[in-house]
């Protein structure tokens, strides 16, 4: 049924930079509040619950907020196919619940998202969160139930709107790095050379795309 098939992103296009649309679900642990959009399974909001804005501002730090036009940011990932088919930022996922909470006594929380393209290809994306930790682990399971190999490349995008910032010696934070960074398990590299970086003039948005894995998914 073509009408019920999930929308897919064109692998030849740049990552989506528009404000998020569609339904979101929320996830809470002892240290994190997340909002995930079912369109693309994108992390649209990330709040550090135990860190405040400042000594005089008790509001928690918002690390990612796709709904704020002044500080637009989103974390998204998916799979591109050489055949043009993609599981990406426009793909519709399903989740069993609208809200998930790390329960008392539990050490971890797993939240699964499921999508398929009605052509024998399915993706089960599981977000794993651990008590006391800020790391977001994403586990993807690709299932190919078609009769042909499914050649795909994995990608991840960090999208944020560029904010012009006049540097001042009276405000040290204006010298802080604000952009993509890569952690390889040993060190952090905040060099755009590790990413394919682009700029959308119409929206004033930078995107950083990092192709990390490619291969065939066999049935």
Image: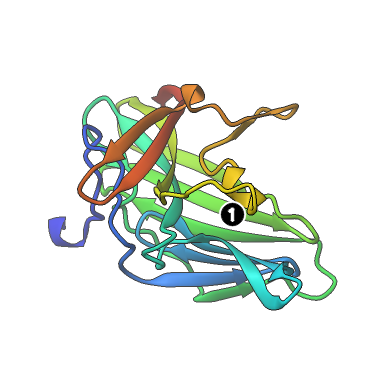
* Vertical placement of residue 79 versus 192, above or below: below
Which quadrant does the N terminus fall into?
Answer: bottom left
Residue 39 percent across, percent down from the top left? 35, 60
Residue at figure coordinates x 72%, y 77% from the top left: 56
Residue at figure coordinates x 52%, y 38% from the top left: 180
* Vertical placement of residue 208 versus 178, above or below: above
Which quadrant does the C terminus fall into?
Answer: top left
Tag 1 secondary structure: strand
Residue with the mark numbered 1: 127
* Vertical placement of residue 108 versus 181, above or below: below
Residue 11 percent across, percent down from the top left? 25, 34
Residue 79 placement: quadrant: top left
Residue 219 seen: no
- Residue 48 relative to residue 131: left or right: left
Residue at figure coordinates x 63%, y 53% from the top left: 171
Q: Nearer the viewer, residue 60 or 53?
A: 53
Residue 31 seen: yes
Q: Nearer the viewer, residue 128 or 57?
A: 57
Residue 127 placement: quadrant: bottom right
- Residue 61 relative to residue 198: left or right: right
Q: Nearer the viewer, residue 83 or 30?
A: 30
Residue 10 percent across, percent down from the top left? 21, 39
Which residue is most to the right? 105
Q: Residues within 10 Å of mark 1 (few under 14, many from 20)?
A: some
Q: Nearer the viewer, residue 9 or 197?
A: 197
């Amino acid at each position: 049924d073509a009408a019920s098939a999930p929308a897919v992103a064109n692998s030849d296009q740049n990552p989506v930079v528009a404000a998020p649309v569609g339904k979101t679900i929320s996830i809470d642990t002892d240290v994190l509040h997340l909002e995930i959009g079912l369109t693309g399974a994108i992390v649209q909001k990330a709040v550090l619950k135990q860190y405040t804005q400042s000594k005089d501002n008790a509001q928690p730090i918002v690390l990612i907020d796709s709904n704020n036009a002044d500080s637009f940011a989103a974390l998204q990932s998916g799979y591109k196919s050489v055949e043009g088919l993609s599981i990406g930022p426009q793909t519709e996922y399903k989740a069993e619940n609208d809200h998930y909470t790390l329960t008392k006594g539990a050490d971890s929380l797993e939240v699964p998202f499921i999508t398929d393209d009605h052509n024998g290809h399915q993706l089960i994306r599981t977000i794993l969160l651990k008590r006391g930790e800020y790391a977001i682990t994403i586990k993807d399971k690709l299932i190919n139930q078609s009769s042909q190999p499914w050649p795909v490349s994995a990608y991840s995008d960090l999208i944020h709107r560029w904010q012009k910032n006049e540097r001042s010696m009276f405000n040290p934070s204006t010298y802080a790095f604000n952009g993509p960074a890569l952690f390889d398990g040993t060190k952090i590299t905040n060099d755009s050379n590790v990413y394919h970086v682009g700029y959308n003039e119409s929206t004033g948005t930078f995107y950083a795309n990092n192709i990390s894995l490619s291969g065939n998914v066999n049935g």
